[in-house]
Amino acid sequence: MIEIERISRAFGGLQAVRSVSFTVAEGSVTGLIGPNGAGKSTLFSIIAGALAPDSGAVRLRGEDITGLPTHQLFHKGLVRTFQIPHEFSRMTVRENLMVVPARQRGENLIQSWLRWPRVVAEDRAILRQADEVLDFLEIGHLRNELAGNLSGGQKKLLDLGRTMMTDAKAVLLDEPGAGVNRTLLGKLADAIERLNRERGYTFCVIEHDMDLIARLCDPVMVMANGELIAEGDMATLRRNPQVREAYLGTGVSGNAGEVAS
Amino acid sequence: MDMAGLSAYAVFFLSLVGIYAIMALGLNMQWGMTGQFNIGIAGFFAVGAYTTAILTSAPAESRVGGFDLPFLVGLAGSVIACIPVAWLVGRITARLRTDYLAIATIGIAEIIRLFFVNESWLSNGTRGIPGIEKPFGLGNNGYLLIIIAFVALAWLLVEIARRSPWGRVLRAIRDNEPATAAAGKDIARFRLQAFITGSCLMALGGGLYAHFVGFVSPEAFRPLYGTFLVWVMLIAGGSGNNLGAMLGALVVWLIWSSTEMIAGLVPTALIGSESAFRVFLIGVLLQIILVSRPQGLLPEKRPPMPGEKR
């Protein structure tokens, strides 16, 4: 679904990403792991349209989307979340979700002035959709809280919830587990799994929590020093000496996740 | 002052409050709702005032026009003339945020004022354009009703905008631009729309002002009256709150006008610098508000959800 073709990007003399190619298959939850400085975030920003590559291309279902601005990628069905949650802090949880749907009649000011009743009716439907998403994520009780007052983990859920307000089928998750406690992390993983299974979302996930990666992702791409060094399922990667050398740690046979995180 | 004098003064006072209220509503759309730091209000105020002055005044030898057109045509002209000006300013400053936008807009407002000072073929220069009549042969009392009607209309339009999904996107932009872009919104387009709409309200205020005083000259569009007071009104009244913007216009204009009355009471040492003293007082007032009640007299409220009664 998302094809990454020989993407390279340098910052000054530093080659952050070096001719990386891989494909995020439709319906998969594809992981992207690697040590700090491996080039994951740079690659992620390039896919998400926040950064232009020096060379190479990103395709979405065969269509070249390299360098399109974020808001246009959204309308092509590719949405992202952020490593640090980007909530609308002075808006309620509900409003955070209601901003998202595309093609709202009321987003045209003239329409809002001239056809106010229709705009309100449409907004009512969007409100119901937002409440359904909040119930799905089990944060319905927070609907009227200001998003800025939520905990870090709840903001991550809200980020995920915003992607559910779209028609998007491909979602880029930037460290969904960072700073989230165990209980909430389980809930987050449940939500991602259900979205993948029940609604057919395709995910591409950057994550440092190896338990989360092992649970959700197949296949997993491993990057180090700007290059893709391995890909496969987590069990295979754990036995790969090159991957252990670069990231998971050597000499530990048991739970690699503890070493990595 | 006798009763008649008092009532005449009240009408005069309220007319200016109404004109300022419309401009504060325009600024609320830009700053309160979107977070755009426009300190060039006076420029759009001037465009509105001059446009209707040229369109509705009697023909003159020394300049273009006047065209002797009706009041409502002049006022519509004020708003329409402002659209390309605001569009241009908005496009030029599209990539600027916060203080940089402020510096750029104050510069542009001065350019507009100096344009009217120097291009006397259009504006009659520093001599100004006289003879801008009130509509329908109305006096001050009748004209106050017209101003009030326009305040009500402006409030309705801005309040609907605030409650609409359009306004919701603006608040999202104010909170977090990258997340708004990630939600598929074209930030530049929304910002430009809010900038133009807010500026058009400032131009409407300018048009109403021109017919109120009957005379425009570049003096009226110095940053103090045209820009600074409007900002104090919005901050004092409550940025983000439309009723607050209007209340701020009333309260600040009341204080501003009463400092004029006490000008006669200032110590002899200050005679000659009364006007500077007034500006100083307003500056102190702004400081006190910002420290003691930064949210203003009427703080911003969340717009009601659809179907919710508020």
Image (cartoon, grey):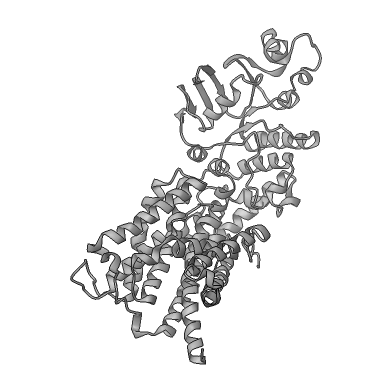
Picture residue at 59% right of the left edge, 62% below the top: B284
Question: Foreground residue, A176 or B224?
Answer: B224
Residue A164, percent from left and from top: 62, 42
The quarter of the picture where residue B206 lies is bottom left
Q: Position of residue B43 (x, y in %)?
A: 39, 59
Residue B182 visible, this orientation: yes
Q: Which corner quadrant holds the C terminus of chain A? A: top right
Q: Is residue B149 left or right of residue B64?
A: right
Q: Which residue is the extreme one toward the left?
A: B61
Q: Quadrant of residue B56?
A: bottom left
**Frontmost residue, A3 versus B119:** B119
To which quarter of the image does residue B167 belong?
Answer: bottom right
Q: Residue at x 22, y 69 (%)?
A: B65
Residue at left offset 58%, top offset 21%: A39
Q: Residue B146's spot in the image, x, y percent?
A: 43, 78
Position above or below: B173 against A70: below
Q: Nearer the viewer, residue B44 or B275?
A: B275
Q: Residue A40: horizontal and vertical position, in percent? A: 60, 23
Q: Please indicate whether residue A145 sits to the left or right of residue B6 in the image.
A: right
